[in-house]
Amino acid sequence: MARRAKQAGLAAIALTDHDSTDGVAAAAAEGALLGVRVVPGCEFSVKAPWGELHVLGYFLPPADARLEDFLRETRAARRRRGEQIVAKLQRLGVPIAWDDVEAQVKGGAVGRPHVARALVERDASDDISDAFTRYLGRGRPAYVEKPLPRLAEVAALVHAVGGIVVAAHLGDHGSEGQIRQFQEQGLDGVEVRHPSHPPSVEQRLTRIAERLALGISGGSDWHGDSEFGDTHAPLGGMRIPVEWLERLEQRRGTTARQSA
């Protein structure tokens, strides 16, 4: 990943896999050799009024026991949910096995996209979008609700280990009133620049963040070269000012002192 970032001309990247920090140490070591800073992080899912909010934990320490215990249980809950989804699909007569899903996960945290890719490989769906429309989306026959922690719980954990919490790709959910409520629960910043955000949304979220004295961030949400479109961009596809990172790091120091 750091090598790809170097090729893209990036000075820094944040590695924020869902519910896992497993690749951070290796990426940071490679980045140090190449002159690319790797910000250690993780993407968490938490409860939101509309269902689910993704939050990015930045500047997380490697191998912290409190954090890793939390993430281990989160991944176990994801696996249980994935197994329940597969069981529902099997009851519907869909030709899929748990091994098909595990082959897509490759050691990471299980999510519905892995099930969707398995469905495509088994010719049970035309593409990932079709898999969600027919089976996996909310209200569809194989949907299983995800157990989610509260934002305040995740924010308290991230602050305790010296990190900060940023709301990811809020889009139209990012009203000032809603963001203010999240701030009261421990939110430190808002991701304003994202492939799914048109300029009007980026500008609106930036103004709200400034009024509430929150940090701002941005990113490509790169999930690999096979997943571009409205929600993901190529690595380096969203140019982010390095000043944004510097301000987030300054905020980290303030948050750490408040949590001590």
Image (spheres, grey):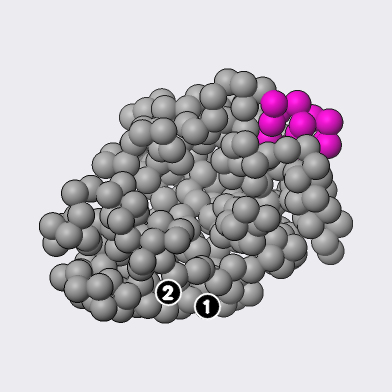
Is residue 205 one of those drawn in magenta?
yes
Residue at 75 percent of width and 45 percent of height: 178
Q: Earlier along the polypeptide chain: callout 1 or callout 2?
A: 1
| Tag shown at residue 81 | 2
Binning the other alpha carbons within 10 Å of mark 2 as few (below 14), some (14 to 19) or many (20 upward) gives many
Residue at 31 percent of width and 47 percent of height: 129
Which-is-in-front pick, marks 1 and 2?
2
Q: Which residues are magenta?
A: 204-217
Binning the other alpha carbons within 10 Å of mark 1 as few (below 14), some (14 to 19) or many (20 upward) gives few
Amino acid tagged 1: Glu
Where 179 sits versus 73, above or below? Answer: above
Residue at 66 percent of width and 56 percent of height: 48
* Residue 221: percent from left, percent from top: 46, 41
Identify the residue position indicated by label 1 in the image. Answer: 73
Secondary structure under tag 2 reads helix
Q: Is residue 44 left or right of residue 131?
A: right
Is residue 238 one of those drawn in magenta?
no
Residue 33: quarter of image: top left
Residue 30 visible at all: yes
